[in-house]
Amino acid sequence: MERSPLVEFQEVTKRFGDGPAVLEQISLTAAAGDFIGLIGPSGCGKSTLLRLIAGLSPITHGSLTIGGRSPEAAAADLAFVFQESTLLPWLNVAKNVEAPLRLRRIPGGQRVATRQRVLELVGLGDRGPAYPRQLSGGQKMRVSIARALALAPRLLLLDEPFGALDEMTRERLNEELLAIREQQAWTAFFVTHSVAEAVFLSNRIVVLSSAPGRIAAEVPVDLPYPRTAETRLSRAYHDLVTEVSRVLRQAESPRPVA
């Protein structure tokens, strides 16, 4: 049975002012529960695409809906995790996670309960009193994810959240993110430059071409969930990494890759 789309792009083009198109003729749907990996050459508009979904930048042409509504109307249903942790250095971990709940005027008791639940979910249940300067890079990103999950989003947008981390930490956080997803019902768009990361996380990978960004290919990832460290040792995983790498090279080059 086909699932109805949660996010739907119909021939979307994005320009900034009178400049050239950054994204062009994007038609794409994501159903509830999808984990969409977005990869492509630098400057192809991956992050811009996330900002369109979040309602942080208007589309120039075409149509974009989230659950049948405009991005602005659906803003309360989504959360954004940026490349940097964007934690407020003068607030401790607990207060950083509670910050968006305060903005939504969530009562104090509910804020505390939600904060503790999501910190435990990311393995930082005892780090509430710590300040960002006392955390490792991986811990900061866990707090950022906890802060996003505190909003109970239907849609989670992640813009290279693990890009600055070492490989072992990145792989561990990939596994933790999928474990959290098993417990919650959100749809994800995940920008990365790592083909291996995209294959491990996603059930579908969207490859964008060089600027202006167009959809060069969509690659289904037929690997069963839950995925673990053992998944990376499988032949199917390595075959998909090879295939997506080939498609990405084609997207970067005006000439077909044999």
Image (cartoon, grey):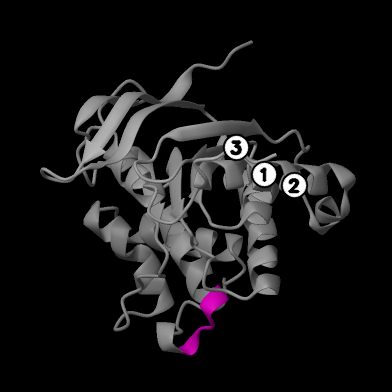
The amino acid beneath tag 3 is: Pro
Q: Is mark 1 on a helix, strand or loop?
A: helix
The amino acid beneath tag 2 is: Thr
Q: Is disc 3 surrounded by few (<14), some (14 to 19) or many (20+) residues within 10 Å?
A: few
Nearer to the camera, 150 or 164: 164
The percent coordinates of residue 104 (x first, y second) are 25, 51
Q: Is residue 205 left or right of residue 140?
A: right
The magenta stretch spans which residues? 134-138
Nearer to the camera, 5 or 133: 5
Which of the numbered marks, if any, corresponds to residue 256?
3
Q: What element carries label 2?
A: helix
Which is the main secondary structure of the residues drawn in magenta? helix
Q: Distance between the residues labelled 1 and 2?
A: 6 Å
Taking the spot 44% from the left edge, 37% from the top edge, the residue there is 154
The residue wearing badge 1 is 246
Q: Which of marks 3 and 1 is nearer the N terminus?
A: 1
Q: Which of marks 2 and 3 is in front?
A: 3
